Amino acid sequence: MLLINHDKSFHLLFVLIVLLLLMKLAPGFFSGVKGATFECIERERQALLKFKEDLIDDSGLLSTWGSEEEKRDCCKWRGVGCNNRTGHVTHLDLSGFNLTSSIFYWLANFGNSLVDLNLSNNHLQGSIPDAFTNMTSLRTLDLSNNQLQGDLSSFGRMCNLNVLNISENNLTGELPQLFQDWHGCVESSLQILQLNGNQLKGSLLDITRFTSMRELVISNNRLDGNVSESIGSLSQLEKLHVGGNSLQGVMSEAHFSNLSKLTVLDLSGNSLALKFESNWAPSFQLIHILLSSCDLGPCFPQWLRNQNNLMKLHISNTRISDTIPNWFWNLSNSNLKYLNLSHNKMSGILPDFSSKYSNILEIDLSSNQFEGPLPLFSSNIASTLFLSYNKFSGPASFLCNIESNTFIVLDLSNNLLTGWIPDCVMNFRSLGVLNLASNNFSGKIPSSIGLMRHLQTLSLHNNSFVGELPLSLRNCSSLVFLDLSSNKLQGEIPGWIGERMPSLKILSLQSNGFSGSIPPNLCHLSNIRILDLSLNNISGVIPKCLNNLTSMVQKTESEYFPANNAVLSTPYMPLYKRDGGGYDIYQNKIRVGWKGREDVMETH
């Protein structure tokens, strides 16, 4: 016998009715329940299909988009995301789809349901369309790496917009005018603004109106004028990138008064002077400091003393003419990965680094006035080490303490180093650049150098090396730049240079004691751009096949030959990681005599 409680049955009946109504009115409500299904809105699906018809999809990026039954649910298409309750398309990631500005009309079909939209890395041109005006629900909009221009008035009423990225486009005009039609709601919602890599002019806008701003990136534009102290009121700011502009004036403690959350500061490439009281202790803890070409001197900046979270410190060309205080080398900087103090007038003797910077990737102390012996480094030293243009003296025995398998660039040029090249260089199997030019090294070139099979640049210019070229050097078949000029090398020019070094673009054996004739094998150097055999004891007939080396007379768009500073493009120079921001190309320098005049040519 089944007994029914009337109160409970009435309650269950009420719940059942509510659930049935929800299923009718919002069929996606149960999408989170196992077995429940939903499909995207038909109008939005048709808009996406119409969009696909206007594209040529040779790479198959839109292969999941179709009208077939098995592809009916557009929420499962590549780059499409939907609300799991309503079925509305809420975000589109169409980055790299080769879109043009004529795709814009279809955006109107999504009304204000879109939350995230990524149209970066396409071919969008012309003015920023008004189609964005009604997308009031949009939270993230990425239009970076296109060719868009015009003002930003379309975004002025986007009250939910958190992230706006229009970097690497063709935006022009005065920066403050771009925001003149913006309203209070978007100013309070916007947290990340990225406008770097455009052609914006004028002063840095009064960003205090953006009260929620966490990240401001306006680097590599044409901004000028001073930086207002009001920037110090942005208490939520974490990252400030304004490098690569023409900003001027003095920045003091007032500019950073309330920036306790700041972790990234990029003012590089401007004419700014940072002048702080010697006892100033900033409230922030920076991770990245990029201040190259700013004025920090003449004293070493004391405010760095409490910065214990640094991963990147780049203060090259900052007019510092001082010894580096001991506290700097003793900072709690085990996380430091990039250290660049180059192009200053820092002096003194460097400490023992063997127990420091165990995780560092790049050290650049070049173009200073450091002296004494080369410091000891930890066995797993950085992948790039620049110590050139200093006054270091003594042998290079410190190299034998290094066991790194990822050593890419070693530049000790233009110092006062003496002795032989130690055989332990054979440990640097991954080395791409070895520059020991303009020192006082002597002895023979070690045969162990032939074990560095990835070597692309070898410069031993202006030393006192003697003897013949080691046969093992022919194993360095990846060489692009080989400068052995101004030494005391002898013997015949080996023919295997032409046979075993097919990528060679620069070869200088100038000012040595080579004898014999020019081997015709050099005619195999089809990529050679500079071949300098002058000031030797070479005799005989010049091989006629040298006329076939046409690369020496071919000019490229990036080639430039001013009177005193010639630059030659050699696109296959070794790439190396620099400052954590992508890859850089090592720049070689070579002296070339021409019609009684000697020029220094820089190749990159």
Image (cartoon, helix red, strand yellow):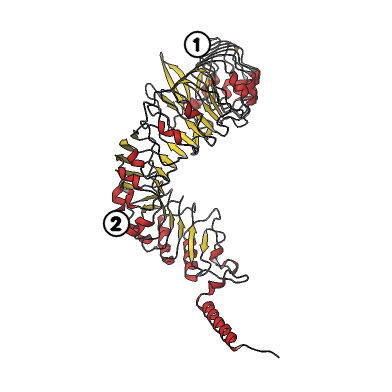
Using the image as rendered, state which of residue 382 and residue 520 is in the foreground.
382
In this rendering, is residue 450 above or below 76? Answer: above
In this rendering, is residue 411 above or below 79? Answer: above
- Residue 604 in view in this figure: no
Task: Name the residue furthest right.
Answer: 1
Mark 2 neighbour class, 10 Å CA radius: few under 14, some 14 to 19, many 20 or more: few
Where is the N terminus found, in terms of image quarters? bottom right
Task: Name the residue furthest front.
Answer: 279
Disc 1 designates what residue?
535
Image location (x, y in percent) of residue 295: 35, 31
Disc 2 designates what residue?
181
Image location (x, y in percent) of residue 582: 50, 39
Mark 1 neighbour class, 10 Å CA radius: few under 14, some 14 to 19, many 20 or more: some
Q: Residue at x 44, y 29 (%)?
A: 555
Left or right of 554 on screen, residue 353: right
Image location (x, y in percent) of residue 312: 48, 36
Left or right of 116 on screen, residue 394: right
Image location (x, y in percent) of residue 299: 38, 26
Specify the quadrant of the image occupied by residue 182: bottom left
- Residue 356 in view in this figure: yes
Using the image as rendered, state which of residue 372 and residue 260 is in the foreground.
260
Circle 1/circle 2 CB separation < 8 Å: no
Using the image as rendered, state which of residue 179 and residue 33 is in the foreground.
33
User: SS for tag 1?
Assistant: loop
Instruction: Give the amino acid at mark 2.
Output: Asp
